[in-house]
Amino acid sequence: MSRKFFGTDGIRGIANREPMTATTALALAAAAGGHFRRGAHRHRVVIGKDTRLSGYLLEPALTAGFISMGMDVILVGPMPTPAIAMLTPSLRADLGVMISASHNAFQDNGIKLFGPDGNKLSDDIELEIERRMEAGIAEQELAGPRDLGRAQRLDDAPGRYMEFAKATFPAELRLDGLKIAVDCANGAAYRAAPTVLFELGAEVVPVAVSPDGFNINRDCGATAPETLATAVVAHNAHVGIALDGDGDRVRMVDEAGRIVDGDQIMALIARAWRRAGKLRGGGVVSTVMSNLGLERYLRSMDLALVRARVGDRYVVEDMRRHGINVGGEQSGHIVLSDHIATGDGLVTALQVLAELVRTGKPASEVMHLFEPAPQLLRNVRYQAGDGAAPLDAGPVKQAIADGQSRLGDGGRLVIRRSGTEPVIRVMAEGDDESLVAAVVESVCASIEAAAR
C-alpha cells in the first residue's frame, strides 16, 4: 500500500487544507485509537501542540476522534515534541500526539504520533492507520454512549518536562557564571528552555519567546540561527542555543557568533561520552546528509559513522540495531537514547553546556572539532502532484550519474525527495569546493527542466 498521509515525520501540510483539516484529524484520531485500543483498561492519549494558530483547529478535532473510540484524552497545551515522547510512557498512555509542523512556517501544521514506549511509529503501523482511515470506522467500533472517553488538562505537564530535562544535566555541575542566549523560535519551548537554563544557574538572554500564533520560526530559531548569532555578540554571551518550533532540534552559536550544526554537536558528545565511558556501540548514527568531515573525525577516534535514511525515526531504528546511544542529523535532530527516544534540542544543548563547564574553555574552542568538507545543498521545488516524476526523467538520471562520476571516490552526491514538502534536495560534497558547486548546479538545472 502506498502512503497517502504520512511522510518522513508524521502528517504535514497547509492548515485547513487537506490533509491538515479538522475532518482528516478526526479520522486519523479514530483510526489510531482503533489500532492502539487493546484490552479492557481505560485507554489514554496525550495531546500536545506548538504555538501555531491552527493548533486550535486540530486539537479539538483529534480530541473528539479519540473520545469517540473510548479513549481518555490528556491535553498538555504548548509543549516541545520531546515532552510528548517523555510524557506518553510516564503517564502510561497508549498513544502520544504532537500537533506541529516543526521548523515550517506558521501556515503549515502537522501531526506526529508516538507509541506507548515514547517512540515514533514504524512504517508498518502508519500504513495500518492509513488503511483504517481509508476504510472508515465501522459503527460497531465506536464506543457506546456509556463508554465514551473524557478529556482533561494536565496543568503540571510543563513542570514534569522541565524536571526531566534538568535531570539529564550532570548533578555535580552548575551553569553558574555562564551567560546563555536561547532562541526558542516563538515555539513550543518558549517557556521551558529559558526556565531550565535559569534554574541550573545560567544568566539567560531569551530570544523569540513571544509567540502570537503567526511568528513561529519567522527569522528565528534553528532554521535562522543568524538571529541568535547577532544576540550572542550583542549581549556578550558565552554561548547561544537555537531551538526550532517544536523543540526537537538544536543549533548552537559560540561566543564569536559562529554557528555550530548537528554534525559538530554529535562529534562533541561522542568524544565526551567516550571519555566518560558512556558511549555505546562503537560509533554514531547519522544520515546520508552528514558531512564527510564528521565521518573522518570519528574515524580518527576509531569510531564508526553509520548512515541511516533521512528522518530521526530511521536514525533511532539504526541506533537500536547497532546498540548505539548517540545519533542524529546535521540539521540538529540529535537523539541521546540514554535519556529519550527522540530528538530533544534542550537535552542535547545541556550535554554541550556540561562539556563547556567541565573544560572551562570558550565555546569556540570546544564546539568546532573538525573542518567540514565543502558541502552544498540546494532545494528544487516541483508540483506536489508529480511525486518523484522529475527524478524519473532520463536527462536527470544521466546528470546524476555524471555528477557522481565527476566527484569520484572522494565525494558524495545525495538526491532525495523531501517527505514533508514538494521539494527535491540535491546535496554534494567533496574536497574541491568549485567542483561541488558545479555538480549541484548541473543536477539542479536538469531537475528544474524536467519539472517544468
Image (cartoon, rainbow, N blue to C red):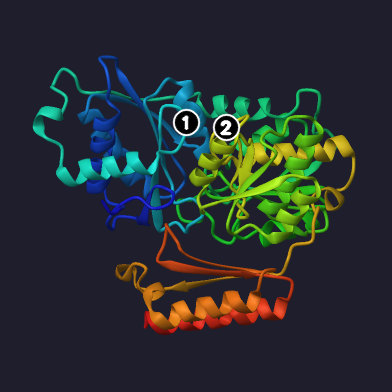
Q: Based on the displayed image, in which of its 4 quarters is residue 72 positioned? A: top left
Residue 71 vs residue 233: left or right? left
Please tell me whether mark 2 sits on a helix, a strand or a loop.
Answer: loop
Residue occupying image coordinates x 84% and y 36%: 357
x and y, in percent, of residue 22 in the image: 26, 47
Q: Nearer the viewer, residue 136 or 309?
A: 309
Q: Which mark is residue 340?
A: 2
Few, some or many C-alpha atoms within 10 Å of disc 1 (few <14, some 14-19, many ≥20)?
A: many
Three-letter code for the amino acid on which mark 2 is drawn? Ile
Query: Which residue is nearer to you in this view: 244 or 8?
Result: 8
125 w.r.t. 412: above or below: above
Determine if residue 221 is in view: no
Q: CA gap, disc 1 to disc 2?
A: 8 Å
Classify 277 as above or below 343.
above
| Residue that carries the numbered disc 1 in the rendered image | 118
> In terms of secondary structure, where does tag 1 sit?
loop
Residue 431: quarter of image: bottom right
State the image quarter where residue 229 is shown. bottom right
Number of numbered discs visible in the structure rendering: 2
Residue 289 higher or lower than 408, as above or below: above
Residue in view at x 52 percent, y 33 percent: 83
For marks 1 and 2, the one nearer the N-term is 1
Q: Looking at this rendering, what residue extends furthest in the top direction?
A: 40
Q: Which residue type carries mark 1?
A: Gly
Q: Are marks 1 and 2 in contact (CB under 8 Å)?
A: yes
